[in-house]
Image (tube, rainbow, N blue to C red):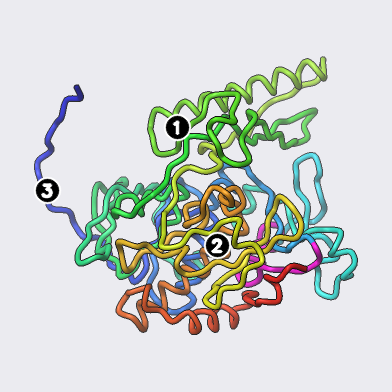
Amino acid sequence: MIDVLKEPARALPVTGAFDVVVAGGGIGGVAAAVAAARTGVSVCLLEKECSLGGLATVGNVTVWLPICDGRGRQVIGGIGEELLRLSVHDLRQPNPAAGFRGVPPCWEPGGDPEARRQTRFVAQFNPAAYILGLERWMLDAGVKLLYDTRLCAVKRARGRVTHVIVENKSGRSALACRTAIDATGDADLCFLAGEETESLDSNVGAAWFYYLKDGAAHLRPVSRSFSPSLKRGELKSPGYRGDDAESVTAQLLDSRALIRDACAQLAEAHPGTDIQPFALPSIPCFRATRRLVGARSLGERDMHVWPEDAVCLTGDWRRSGPVFAITPEMLRGVANRNLLSVGRCMSADTTIWDCTRVIPTCVVTGEAAGAAAAMACRDCAGDVHRVPAAALQALLRERGNLIDPALVAAG
């Protein structure tokens, strides 16, 4: 039996009021925050770490996966392309050992169409440089940023999230919000707000780390064998879930053991060479943990299907050809009229979750959700369900997003 300790009730100070509060400063969160701020509303972004970028930066997963369909067609524009280019904007020359590679020349303006069919629109970046670039980009957009701040609870009234409750060095406090966006990657905000969620226990030990070999930096990903279909029964090692404290700790310990083993293997392969690990990931490298179960979930069945209310597109980083259209129902909460969820915790079933968990889908859903939240505050009393899809599409297209049925069709 678990003992229960009752805390006395306490009055929490409301330390801010914002049109949009975004929980999570990964790539999806920063895209959502800036997309909303560019519409002229007040935005606060909460991040439990002390850097932006999430897995892409403090997790060292430094590959900007494709924003094209693998057959020469770009399917993500807007903030997606902007952030891809920002990730390597100061890279003067490639460094293959460290995993630094700029935008392929064929994807520069006027690039060769035939080469684009052979080479995907990707980049590989320096995570430290990207942290600095993302932070300046956010501040320039006018977003209020709170680092070292953990989401703890929410207050709801009449089917809406009215306050987000946080803890940081100032103590426990509340932030009033008209709309809220879950970019935690683990659907923490959705769960706390009473939305239906799905959790997986099929994550494995994994980590991307850097090491020095004769003074030169090298990137080394390590991972246990994982299930591409995210099924626990297909694993040959322990499976971990991202919504349980003991499991998160066990995954981190397993991942550090992999790093130690990799360093030992490197030392054995290069006797007499000084090999030193550095820049370990500082967050657990989970593939998929918990997600919103929305009114509609994206699935493999949606490949090359054009819905009239599509607000963004994404390709498939694993294979050439597929294009998926994402609708507002896949981003909106059901129990809360003012809640949206993006990236890894959007409403996507296990047939496609391994595709939607990565940077391109995070950023494109983040921009769509941020724009929708801002429009809801401006025109719909904060109700994201009332935002007209056609108006949202028009705003996103105006900002360079590629929302086109011709791109969804099989190419």
Q: Is residue 405 visible?
A: yes
Residue 373, how many percent across, how many down?
Answer: 41, 72
Give yes or no for contact between labels 3 and 1 (Cβ–Cβ under 8 Å): no
Which amino acid, mark 2? Arg
Residue situated furthest left in the rendering: 8
On the image, numbered disc 2 is attached to which residue? 136
Give yes or no for contact between labels 2 and 3 (Cβ–Cβ under 8 Å): no
The answer to whether residue 72 is magenta is yes
Question: Mark 2 or 1 closer to N-term?
Answer: 2
Name the quarter where the N terminus is drawn. Answer: top left
Question: Mark 2 or 3 closer to N-term?
Answer: 3
| Callout 3: SS | loop
Q: Which mark is residue 248?
A: 1
- Extent of the magenta region: 71-88
Q: Which mark is residue 282?
A: none
Badge 2 density bin: few <14, some 14–19, many ≥20, Cα 10 Å: few
Write the residue at 47% across / 25% down: 250
The answer for how far apart the CA atoms under marks 2 and 1 are is 31 Å
Residue 263, how many percent across, how many down?
Answer: 69, 22
| Callout 1: SS | helix
Residue 43, how many percent across, how many down?
Answer: 39, 68
Residue 188, how many percent across, how many down?
Answer: 37, 49
* Front position among marks 2 and 3: 3
Which amino acid, mark 1? Val
Badge 1 density bin: few <14, some 14–19, many ≥20, Cα 10 Å: some
The answer for how far apart the CA atoms under marks 3 and 1 are is 30 Å
On the image, numbered disc 3 is attached to which residue? 10
Write the residue at 50% across / 68% down: 34
